[in-house]
Amino acid sequence: MLLILPASLEAAKTYQNPTDFISEQFSGAPPTAKIQTITPALQSRLSQINGSPYKSSRVRYWKKGTRTVYILEDIGKTQLITIGYVIDGQKLSNVKVLIYRESHGDDVSRTYFTKQFKSVDLKSSGKLSKKPRNIAGATMSVRTLSRMARAALLLSSAI
Amino acid sequence: MNFKRKKWIRSLHTILGIIVLVPLLLFTITGVLLNHKHELRLNDRFVKSEWIMKQYGLDLTAPSVVWELGADEFFAQYSGQYILNSSNVELDKAPLSAIKISSGFCIASEDKIHFFDHRATLIEALETGLSLPKGEIVALGTDANGKLVIRYQDGFHIADSPDLISFSPTTESAVHHWAKQGKLTASQLKQAKKTLIAEGQPLERVLLDLHSGNIFSLAGKILVDLFAIGILGLSISGLLIAKRKWKKA
């Protein structure tokens, strides 16, 4: 008998614990998290480039030297995707899907997809300097990763 | 073709034509609108109707769970929708506790606390192990100063300040007040219902469900199937009538 679970009951795939991801990015010695308030001006800019404001009025970030790490999450199709973004200077140096909760489309967690974000920065128009190739069957997840990449770069530039 | 059979086909054609007229109109209108959904921005428009909300399984009569937040404030759960006073709030997991603190409201699931300000705007979604101490959340409380106390499976933690930036271990004796469930008053029920209906359903969703018959559940789907068979019957009877006319010609 085949047991079919609704998407909401299927277990989320945890590729890496967010705390471990942060620690890894700072060679095992992560800084204390800081709080970044998303001002009305920043929300307005986020709305402009992403089509909607960021869902909360503050985010945490970890910064040491020129490296900043954000753990952001947003809805793919119906479930949240938790993503780690590492920014060195003003460019993305690492993007990793940490927790994937959708029932389909987890190809976005593969290295062949996320490595497309390496060295990407934000143009003045608000677009990424390089658009990642879409994955058939994972369009909404691809859009979420791109949207959060833009958000991470913009937030980082405002620190 | 004998006379009786001709008459029978003609009668069937007329009856089918009358029967499918109304569903055909509905099908045509919804189909044309959906064909231009981007231009018409159907996903940005919302249908705010109690009847529509009921078709989507929203029971407006009573919430499934209510937490009392004090002074006529409440947090209520209605089958997947959540109301914090007069605002719809989005949560990604079913909550297990909700409480008012000095700086706003906290709504907890076992691994997350959604922290809202007094206007029900989300300040931050705090996660255990990242922005909260590790562990499984069991309940929420406040100390005598309205600071958040979290009861975990294996202990207690208290917020160091009202902004919930950091937490320290504590004991149960720090808790002055625990989150508690309750019932909505008549005026709160009215307010919650109004808030739920105000949320609405995207017009695109409603049109899709009308077009497929989904909006009326199984009965609707069967009606759409019968409509499709009716259209087929109309076409066949029409062809048979036309065939006779061609033969005559």
Image (spheres, grey):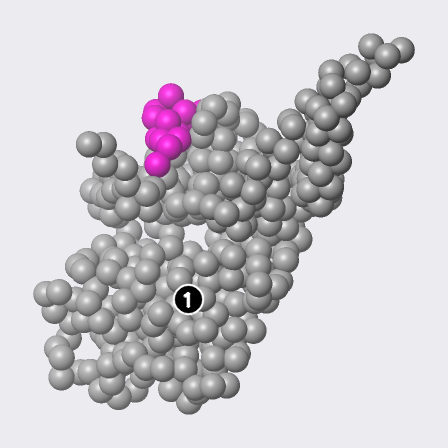
- The residue indicated by pointer 1 is B78
- Asked if residue A86 lies in the magenta stretch, the reply is no
Tell whether B22 sits left or right of A78.
Answer: right
Q: Residues within 10 Å of mark 1 (few under 14, many from 20)?
A: many
- Element at label 1: strand
Q: Residue at x 41, y 82 (%)?
A: B184
Q: Residue furthest right?
A: B249
Where residue B145 sits, quadrant-wise, is bottom left
> Which amino acid type corresponds to the residue marked 1 in the rendered image?
Tyr
Q: Residue furthest left?
A: B154
Residue B107 at x, y percent in the picture: 34, 68
Q: Is residue A57 visible?
A: no
Tell whether A90 sits left or right of A16.
Answer: right
Q: Tell me which segment is drawn in magenta.
A: A103-119
Name the magenta segment's main secondary structure: helix
Total marks placed: 1
Residue B49 at x, y percent in the picture: 61, 64
Q: Is residue B91 above or below residue A135?
A: below
